[in-house]
Image: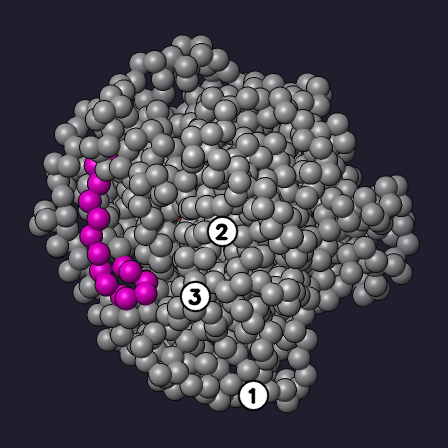
Amino acid sequence: MNLTLYVWRQKGPKEKGSLERYEAKHVSPDSSFLEMLDEVNEDLIKSGKDPIVFDHDCREGICGMCSQMINGIAHGPDTEITVCQLHMRKFKDGDSIYIEPWRAKAFPLISDLMVDRSAFDRIIESYGYTSAHTGGVPDGNAIPVSKVNADIAMDAAACIGCGACVAACPNASAMLFVSAKVSHLGVLPQGEVEAARRVKAMVSQMDAEGFGNCTNHYECEAACPKGIKVTFISRMNRELLKAIPQVEKKAAGGGF
Amino acid sequence: MILDGKCPTGPIETSWDRHRFEMKLVNPANKRKFKVLVVGTGLAGGAAAATLGELGYNVEAFCYQDSARRAHSIAAQGGINAAKNYPNDGDSIYRLFYDTIKGGDFRAREADVWRLAQVSNNIIDQCVAQGVPFARDYAGYLDNRSFGGAQVSRTFYARGQTGQQLLLGAYQALCRQVQAGSVKLHTRREMLDLVVVDGEAKGITCRNLVTGQIESYWGDAVVLCTGGYVNVFYLSTNAMGCSVTAAWRSAKKGAYFANPCYTQIHPTCIPQSGDHQSKLTLMSESLRNDGRCWVPKKQGDERAAHQIPEDERDYYLERKYPSFGNLAPRDIASRAAKEQCDDNRGVGPGKRGVFLDFADSIKRLGEDKIRERYGNLFDMYEKITDENGYKQPMRIYPAPHYSMGGLWVDYNCMSNVPGLFVLGEANFSVHGANRLGASALMQGLADGYFVIPNTIANYLARITPGKVKDDHPEFKRSREEIQGQMDKLLSIKGKKTVSELNRELGKVMWNNAGMARSEQSLKEAIKRIPELREEFWNNVNVTGVSGSTNQQLENAWRLADFLEFAELFVKDALHREESCGGHFRVEHQTEDGEAMRDDENFCYVGAWEFKGIDKEPELHKEPLKFENVELAVRSYK
Ligand SMILES: Cc1cc2nc3c(=O)[nH]c(=O)nc-3n(C[C@H](O)[C@H](O)[C@H](O)COP(=O)(O)OP(=O)(O)OC[C@H]3O[C@@H](n4cnc5c(N)ncnc54)[C@H](O)[C@@H]3O)c2cc1C
Ligand code: FES
């Protein structure tokens, strides 16, 4: 099939960007979206032009590196999918496709479709972990974990950190990402111990990074390639409400 | 030269404990004076950097992706082995050790494998403490499944995302150290050179992939955890950015490359659909727990699967290997699939595929149970092929997947270049000529959490911290050399793109040094590779400039390294006149097509010393001794 692409081109964060038009010819419906872009890039290189810069690595929907707005939808028009897993059979011959980067203040643009998502790393650094030392931990079966909780933790832990939730949200909020990690660890006995400190630290780092607030649009859930549910956001809000008095009491010298 | 792995002697059961006691320690107050560079943040690198930071060393960690969490370990699906024996089905450290030695076709060191089996249990405990959401039963205890090459259930898993969950555990532990100030992370950096001063590793040269800047980093030790090299076949289950670059450039600085020809072709991948294809997708081996492999008995059968009656199907793995059946090890299952297709019994477009059928399991357990076990794999299959694996059998075909070969290391995971350590898939150590499923994750975490934190001290305790820093002239020389290479690549302005040449190399390797190798095919490859290399350096077209983000340039240097490394790979395959594990020489097979080892002449690790491009590499041998497992013909019948 033949397609017309409008791709966001921008050499660097300070340069001006614009949508450029390209023709993608003889695209196989069995090729993936990124393979289609590979072909477009081959043509660009052959005509002496700079190929389109985009992030990608595993190309199997798990590393979270690929990140594109396709016709205004994060990761494009299919459910629970990343761009690299999106296949061209989802499009029709003659379609026009608009391809843009994630747009959010907290994700500054690097080049073309590539953005800087290190804010997510800093949020995890703030407390997205359990403080277990290597070695000196009990046997893996010492603390039974109910299957229900183990399953909830896994649902939340499935997040690939791609940032689609932020890109899809009109407020560029990172609540789905943060709540997924807070819930993953908070629901397990191994992580619950630090739950109050964790949620406070992570939410405050999230705010410091310049992500917006959640006003219940649920666009994040719709865009999430791993089907992470907004119920984790309400769970996190409850955890935060519980946490604030607890952590403050401790800071004031209480908490015995 | 005869190489010495410096393995502890004496009873194997206590070898690691005795060795730990005998090694030197670094006093806690001195640890922060030592700077350790950890290149790679996958299971091996992430675990190593986090643990070394926690111990108090001053750590800097590097990866080429935008975040440490995206290393290709993330893609591992099936699971991780450990000798816990929770199911009480006869497992033990000894059995895991035995299975791994046998699975590797007796081409790995006993002492290293024993240690791996011993610490496997600590790994599970560690991961649970980190919050890795392993699958559990209704009583709340950890669940296990079976993997190829084993008759016990010792594989722990987190749905079909085990690698992701283990990596997130390591990444989060790493983030905790970043917050504590003991680890500094450098993302979007690619190591392009190892800096060696007076014979010891003292730092690395990187390119900042955003700005294009060539940067120097000094360290008292360098720990390479840069993954595998099967992208030398172009199409593989690895990520697009996986390369041999860090390992190969270290080899060019003196580190020996061991057993490069030992590569694993994974039996259960989605078949290639066309020339546009950029990578192949794995369907976890765990599927073989419940899926049955078959092909039509009739050659060239064009019927759809459901039209082929039961008695016209050949469940070839069950027929050939009755005791392991569909769970035969990977090398054997892959070759069997290739045999069927070569024999014109393949299925699907292009006839390079076999069926993996779940109908019986669905009948027995119900579709819901199968969905619970493998739902995400069925979804992925459908997204790629547009076919529903619950309704019709999946089609699978073998694809390059894992490299057992890698940089040579001794028992301490140190290469022959003092101060250069190599962990995870990047080293050669524990899998011999074939890796069993669910044991790479185990190795990465064993090396990172439990081996290197002990063994690195033994080296550091002997040297003065910070003796060589990045103002040493060797760093400047290295930067200039790397910059020169970038400029050269950009100046060629030829007619072929990097990916065109990359595909060509891939074809040469797959056709001549893939699942079956012969003297003739390998000699053909040895002729073609230098020709391709020459064409690359005269006719490649790399656009853009070196001083900014330039993904074509990245692809170009990775290919340049593969074009050199491929030749060593093929030479190794040619020299090894035997069949073992993933290395199958058609000249060396039994009457019924099984691999035939030659223990008399090839029971050694082949470690190659780089002597210059277009010069013959020198082979060093490390003899392998089997004192605890008897050298035997590996049979899964
Ligand atoms: C699809 C798939 C499924 C798998 N499933 C399983 C399974 O179920 N069980 C199992 O045991 N094993 C499995 N494996 C194998 C296993 O995942 C890998 O062998 C293992 O994770 C490798 O870990 P690693 O830390 O050595 O390397 P990787 O995870 O590949 O990490 C390499 C790191 O090095 C960095 N790097 C590389 N080159 C450079 C450079 N030049 N400069 C800077 N940084 C660099 C990368 O950025 C990355 O951080 C699977 C593999 C694949 C591909
Ligand atoms: S490239 Fe890894 S998720 Fe798309």
Closer to the chain start, of discs 1 and 3, is: 1
Residue at (62%, 47%) from the top-left corner? A238
Q: Which residue is mark 2?
A: A203
Residue at (44%, 12%) from the top-left corner? B14
**Magenta segment, which residues?**
B207-221
CA neighbours of label 1 inside 10 A, class few (<14), some (14 to 19), many (20+): some
Residue contact at pointers 2 and 3, CB within 8 angstroms: no
State the residue in front, A211 or B398.
Answer: A211
Q: Is residue A193 left or right of residue B393?
A: left
The kind of secondary structure element at disc 3 is loop
Residue at (53%, 40%) from the top-left corner? A245
Chain for disc number 1: A
Residue B14 vs B263, above or below: the answer is above
Q: Which residue is mark 3?
A: A107
Point out the residue furthest to the top here.
Answer: B10
Label 3 sits on what residue type? Phe
Between label 1 and label 3, give the one nearer the viewer: 3
Residue contact at pointers 1 and 3, CB within 8 angstroms: no
Residue contact at pointers 2 and 1, CB within 8 angstroms: no
What distance separates the C-alpha of mark 2 from that of mark 3?
A: 17 Å
Residue B350 pos. (x, y %)? 68, 66
Closer to the chain start, of discs 2 and 1, is: 1
What distance separates the C-alpha of mark 2 from that of mark 1?
A: 42 Å
Chain for disc number 2: A
CA neighbours of label 2 inside 10 A, class few (<14), some (14 to 19), many (20+): many
The kind of secondary structure element at disc 1 is strand
Between label 2 and label 3, give the one nearer the viewer: 2
Q: Which residue is mark 1?
A: A4
